[in-house]
Image (cartoon, rainbow, N blue to C red):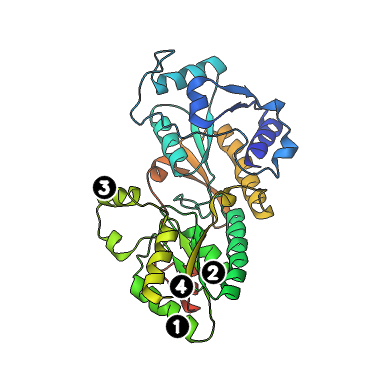
Amino acid sequence: AAIRALCVAGKNKYGMKFIGIRNGYRGLIDNDVFKMDKLDFDSLVTAGGTCLGTSRVKPFKNPVPDPKTGLLPVEGIKETFKKNKLDALVCLGGNGTNTTASLLADAGFNVIGLPKTIDNDIVGTEESFGFQTAIQVATEGIEAIRTTARSHHRVMVVEIMGHKVGWLGLYAGLAANADAILLPEIPYDIKKLGKFIKSKFDGGQGYAVIACSEGAINLEEAKLGKKEFKKARESMAQSVGFRVAKELEAETGIETRTSVLGYTQRGGNPKPYDIVLATTIGAAAADFLAAGEFGKLVAINDGKITGVPLSTVAGVVKAITEDDPVLQTARALGICFGD
């Protein structure tokens, strides 16, 4: 929807022409491009995922010459700009994408960033498109798991995406009325969590559902340095949701199982809210291009489009803070965060 809005608005208002770059920065380096007028723009409105493809290539991280051309990644990008007579580049993505976009801007390229991530962790914008759709998918997943938790009198740990921040886990957990929510921002104490879960069984509920971010950490992990933490996580045989289930069952003696929602949260058709948000931001990006507002993230704050310097976005993660109103609401409703 954002790509469609950018191209249609840019053409209608300013007579702009666009080319698509396949597979993100990999395609930018390799000049893997095509004319955007070959796309069926109407079909893009309700298409989910990444229609141009993507990659995890980081042009500025440990750059090495291309074995075929001998060019460094940034030199390859310069050649792509030159061959296609590009005036500017629009990058859609999350933290990694926009961090690289900022580095490209520093290197002299005309760049604009758009906030596209289900994690909703980009600073400078209230919301990223994709977030609301993922909330609905995760919420429906938690609600479906509740059925088996109730019938089998179990604790069910539902693992939700969110490696560094827990926006998705918090919102989906609250929407699905989870009994507990575990987040990367709030280290959990397994004894406190276990005591809370036992109270749910002793009080007659007879089951419990936990929304667990994949990046949730316990008290011991919170004390580790960055390198130690990374090493500890890499040594884990299974994901966090399974560890929580194992710890909890050992603590409470209650049968506990894990369900990982996985990549379903990234797929499917976008919800109307996200379509409107992406369309609004995409159309605004055309205005930024026309005005020469480069080196900016097209953001939305207080219901208005704003331009945020990419330099303030790069390498920064928008984390949940204790004064967040949604977190406070969840606490007021008695949802446990294990702290």
Question: Which-is-in-front pick, marks 1 and 4?
Answer: 1
- Figure quadrant of the N terminus: top right
- Residue position for label 1: 199
Question: Which-is-in-front pick, marks 2 and 1?
Answer: 1
Q: Amino acid at mark 1?
A: Ser
Question: Which-is-in-front pick, marks 3 and 2?
Answer: 3
* Residue 39, horizontal then vertical, whole percent: 70, 30
Crowding at dot 4, Cα within 10 Å, few <14 / some 14-19 / many 20+, comes out as few
Q: Residue at x 41, y 32 (%)?
A: 58
Residue 174, label in figure: 2
Is 65 or 299 nearer to us in this picture? 65
SS for tag 2? helix
Looking at the image, tell me whether mark 3 or mark 4 is earlier in sequence order. Answer: 3
Furthest toward the top, the residue is 69
SS for tag 1? helix
Query: To which quarter of the image does residue 174 belong?
Result: bottom right
Looking at the image, tell me whether mark 1 or mark 3 is earlier in sequence order. Answer: 1
Q: Amino acid at mark 2?
A: Leu
Asked whether the residues under the numbered discs 3 and 4 touch, taking CB atoms below 8 Å apart as contact, a structural biologist would say: no
Q: Amino acid at mark 3?
A: Lys
Crowding at dot 2, Cα within 10 Å, few <14 / some 14-19 / many 20+, comes out as many
- Figure quadrant of the C terminus: bottom left
- Residue position for label 3: 227
Q: Amino acid at mark 4?
A: Gln
Q: Give the spatial CA distance, label 2 vs label 1.
A: 19 Å
Looking at the image, tell me whether mark 4 or mark 2 is earlier in sequence order. Answer: 2
Asked whether the residues under the numbered discs 1 and 3 touch, taking CB atoms below 8 Å apart as contact, a structural biologist would say: no
Is 285 or 183 nearer to us in this picture? 183
